[in-house]
Image: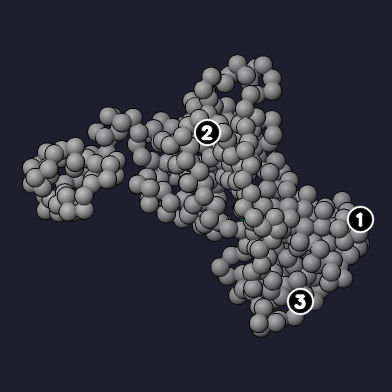
Amino acid sequence: MATMADVARSAGVSVATVSHVLNGTRPVLPHTRQAVLDAVDALGYTPNTLARSLVTSRTRSIGLAVSAISNPYFTEILQGVEAAALQAGYSLLIADPHDDPRHERKVVQLLHERRVDGMIVAPSADPHQLVGYLRRHAVPTVFLDRLLDAGMAEAVPPDATRAAATPPGAPCFDQVCAESAAPTALLVTHLAGLGHRRIGMIAGLPGLSTTGERITGYREGLAAAGLECDARLLVSGQSESVTAERVVAGLLNLPDPPTALVTANNAMTIGALRALRRLGRSVPDDIALCCFDDFAWADLFSPRLTAIAQPSRELGALAAQVLLDRLAAPDRPGRTVRLPCAFVHRTSCGCPEEPDQAGAARLIAPSTLSEKGTAS
Ligand code: HPA
């Protein structure tokens, strides 16, 4: 098997130059670089990344732990992370924590044992064990999609027990997520503007920051439209289709059922549509529907789904970039970066088809990419 020394001899350069070309650690003259690459090709040289890791203590790999990888939202996030990581010369190790706190802690430990350089994690609704582990082992981590609550995101844990568990030099955490409240409020005010007075909300898994923010947005939207919040119209679909189908059927059985629904994610939209079809309700004539999450086939439904599009690929790419920034500068302050969503106006809300505007996406304020320092 060809070695680095063979490549160096064949290209007429030093072993150090071969290393710089292959690792991108220093600029090398174009013709020297080409000579090295030609020699690599001709000799079929394959770098031994395990040997390199022993020398550098870095594996040039990133651990990615996200639940529901088959959900298009997370699949697109994964594509964004992968593309950005690959471009920087990093590979990915992927795990699915199944939104289960104990499983989450276990898969993160497995990734850490494989010595990934850092991790991108979409935390579960109860991430205490996870965060404790990442702090104790000083794992550079970007939390994605779901924000840690304020207590957990602090630089210095608020109570002595947790302070004792946090070694000096424990890392700052970074967070990357999409706006959730303003887009949900917009769906509600849009429906209210069409005359709806009883607007139901199918919310996600309790404990996730995305769920909390979308409920806040629902309440803000109702208040902005001068509508009361009827607690019976705010139900949890647990972020999944089967529960959403059941609770939507329950809403329709109320003596005074909603005339419009907001679903807080794509899976629950499918559940809601199943319930409506099973019960013979047509959208939007019997009940209007607006959804959080756009997806590739949302405009193939009849009517076409009015939806909030999350910038999922961008979120993934940004999370990778934020992690790479942290690896390059471990002591930098923690950041929380939020990206705006877009309103994709179609017809399930009850608006008529307007060919010139059909499916047009409109960015929702706060429309500027906000970047706040968070201590964590
Ligand atoms: N978070 C945010 N958006 C989503 C999710 C989630 O877990 N699932 C589907 N859309």
Residue at horizontal 24 percent and vertical 33 percent from the top: 51
Question: What element does badge 2 sit on?
Answer: loop
Q: Nearer the viewer, residue 78 or 25?
A: 25
Residue 94 at x, y = what percent?
A: 44, 45
What kind of residue is marked 3? Cys
Left or right: residue 338 compared with residue 12: right
Residue 194 at x, y = what percent?
A: 83, 72
Q: CA distance from mark 1 to mark 3?
A: 24 Å
Q: Nearer the viewer, residue 58 or 104?
A: 58
Q: Which residue is mark 2?
A: 332
Q: Earlier in the sequence, mark 2 or mark 3?
A: 2
- Residue 245, visible in the rendered structure: no
What kind of residue is marked 1? Glu
Image mark for residue 351: 3
Residue 105 at x, y = what percent?
A: 53, 33
Residue at horizontal 35 percent and vertical 33 percent from the top: 58
Q: Earlier in the sequence, mark 2 or mark 1?
A: 1
Q: Are marks 1 and 3 in contact (CB under 8 Å)?
A: no
